[in-house]
Amino acid sequence: MNLRKLKYLATGAFAFAMLVGSAHAETQTLRLLTWGNYAPDNVIALFEEKYPDIKVEVTFSNNEEMVAKLRATGGAGFDLAQPSHDRIFAVQKEYNIYKPLDLTKINTDVMDPKLLEGVKANTTIDGEVYAVPHEWGTSGIMVDKSKAPDIKNWSDLCDPQYKGKTSMRLRRTILLGMAYSMGKDPFAAYSDLGEYQKILDEVSEKLIACKDNLKAYWKGGDDLSALMLSGEVIASETWDSTAYKLYAQNQNIVFVPPATGALAWIDTFALPRKGEADDAAYKWINFVMQPEIVTMMSAKSGAIVAVKDGIAMMPEDKKAAVQAAFSEEAIANLKFFANIPPGLEDMEGKVLEKIKAATGSE
């Protein structure tokens, strides 16, 4: 082979390599597994404008589905997931579906230190941290105070005077909330699953007896919003963010932290074990925690982003709703979800199925 031909082949190989590299950069995909409203179109557009070599692909989900999807693939199929802070430790120990974070690649200085340290404490395994906080909020009661001014606790949803006018979602939140309203401490019982089963049995009896009070069981925030705005439902168990959104349309609809304490959650960022775009995932985490993006995220989700002064960065209507809902005492009374031990969700699932069967719900 003469020198001229060798030079031609080398040049062609270099051009081909550059072409392949360029095509790869153009088609890099960041696959998000997240909650509805946590990846707004306007935020995605700004991210893709800043990082034109990254395309964001979103799959909306919830805690149970996230675990199921990642279990089925051994942690493949997604590059960034957003499970709640209590759904990581036991799941990781049992199924190994996440990988440790490299905290040097995350701008943790902008995060609320209490929320950051709380999530790190909940998700550290063998010295490795598996999650950092993104958005946080609470679950409690949404009330139209012009129609039900006396509702103060979870159990009030079952008060006969509101027959056919209340709602709830048949998931673990209502089990926990109703347990607290019955004088139980479900999180303390996590260390004794026999005791926890007794609590679940008592709660299931309460919720089955409550069925005539319910207009409907809600499944999504939009469904519940329609029921509240129409007046068909005057009080419901809910995420606070749903109530905050409705407050802007009707200031009689407010979030009420239950007297026994609102249940507080923190949704996180976690890397699936077989994710293929870690660098893009870190870029997304840092991008959405910027002040201007924080406001856009809260505007869409209604939740509080876990940055310093996160409430102050909310849009004015959401900020007003938070201030109308929470006193300092109510914040001090928050009950943060505890890490879920193995086997507990199966117990809860069986109780929820029992309630569904007894109440004729889907």
Image (cartoon, grey):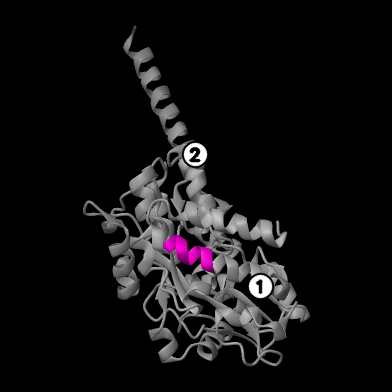
Give the residue pinned by disc 1: 210
Residue 162 in the image: above or below residue 266: below
Residue at coordinates 36% horizontally, 48% vertically from top-left? 92
Q: Position of residue 68 (x, y in %)?
A: 51, 46
Q: Quadrant of the N terminus?
A: top left
Q: Position of residue 298 (x, y in %)?
A: 53, 74
**Which-is-in-front pick, marks 2 and 1?**
1
Residue at coordinates 58% horizontally, 79% vertically from top-left? 155
Q: Amino acid at mark 2?
A: Ala
Magenta region: 196-202
The foreground one among 297 and 64 is 64
Residue 249 in the image: above or below residue 35: below
Residue 178 in the image: above or below residue 57: below
**Mark pair 2, 1: CA separation:** 36 Å
For residue 356, side relative to residue 273 (left or right)? right
Report helix, strand or loop for mark 2: helix
Asked where in the image residue 158 lies, by quadrant, the reply is bottom right
- Disc 1 crowd, CA 10 A, few/some/many (<14, 14-19, 20+): some
Earlier in the chain: of badge 2 and badge 1, it is: 2
Residue at coordinates 33% horizontally, 61% vertically from top-left? 191
Give the residue pinned by disc 2: 72
Q: Is residue 52 among the parts visible in the rendering?
A: no
